Image (cartoon, rainbow, N blue to C red):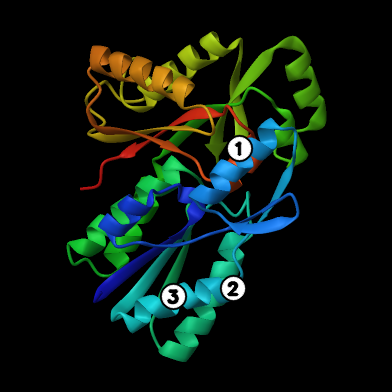
Amino acid sequence: MPGVAVLTDSTASLSPESAARLGVRVVPLRVLVDGADHPDDASARHLLARHLHDGGTATTSQPTPAALVEAMEEAVDDGASALVSLHLSAELSGTVGAARLAAAEVGERRGVPVHVVDTRTVGGGMAFAVTAAAERAARGADADGVLAAARETAARSSVFFAVPDLHYLARGGRIGPARAFLGSALGVRPILALRGGRLAVVETARGAARTQRRIVELAVRAAGGPGAATPRGDGGLVRVAVHHFADEATADTLAAALEDRLTETGAQVESIVRSEVTAVVGAHTGPGVVGVALAPASR
């Protein structure tokens, strides 16, 4: 479509319906399950969940520059005057680097500017940045306006999550093996967040129920509830996402508790959505991960 086109990768965990509604092109990362390479889609997610539950392992990889070039050129062919391509943190993947190579090639060959954004986040934090960019583009903003919406939303997003088994994060190099062993041995679950594009432990809790309660309280503060940097209600409308991988029941419990607490505290919430992260994210967190992402509603 004419105007500014928005692209992203699959780790934003946007549903196909949401991507279509927003007019966003999604380029899948890749996941290798039992020796077979799959695009990071719903089929791969279901396959991976069964594989990991059976004790298997999986590896992931970024999209090829060729796949990114193809998506960018499709947007140009549809009449886009500029492209904004948003991707997961460069601290977690080389996808941004591949996107920059593709952007340079498309920009030179097709004469259309392609802006690549390292969102410094993943999952819901990234999805909200993509949504803000697409909504701004749909209102006729130029590339600078779309970029500003994406960057501001990404920078102000918060992501909190916890996993029942730390060894998946350790295997992928996201946390140290010593921390993973100690946490598993003592039943301690670190609550992690994205800080400067990297995973960081914000606090620890013992047991699943206590961990979920702490995630709820951290999310409430980020949304403008008690203990927030701004008084409740003064932070403006926020969007909230509850994520999981292969544990819908726990995500439902977390979402219900979070909705109750947000209502109690008077935080201004535009929407709460529930979604399952993609296979690539799930491969690094393992089954049972649950978390919350928040970001300002776009204006």
Residue denoted by label 2 = 65
Which disc is residue 109 wearing?
none
Note whether 244 is above or below 156 in the view shown: above
Q: Would you identify the image quadrant in which residue 267 lies?
A: top left
Q: Amino acid at mark 3?
A: Met
Note whether 194 is above or below 69 in the view shown: above
- Does residue 153 appear left or right of residue 123 in this picture? left
**Under tag 2, what secondary structure?**
helix
- Does residue 165 appear left or right of residue 281 in this picture? right
Residue denoted by label 1 = 49
Q: Position of residue 271 (x, y in %)?
A: 25, 34
Q: Earlier in the sequence, mark 1 or mark 2?
A: 1
Indicate which label's residue lies in the foreground, 1 or 2.
1
Residue denoted by label 3 = 72
Q: Earlier in the sequence, mark 1 or mark 3?
A: 1
Q: CA distance from mark 1 to mark 3?
A: 31 Å
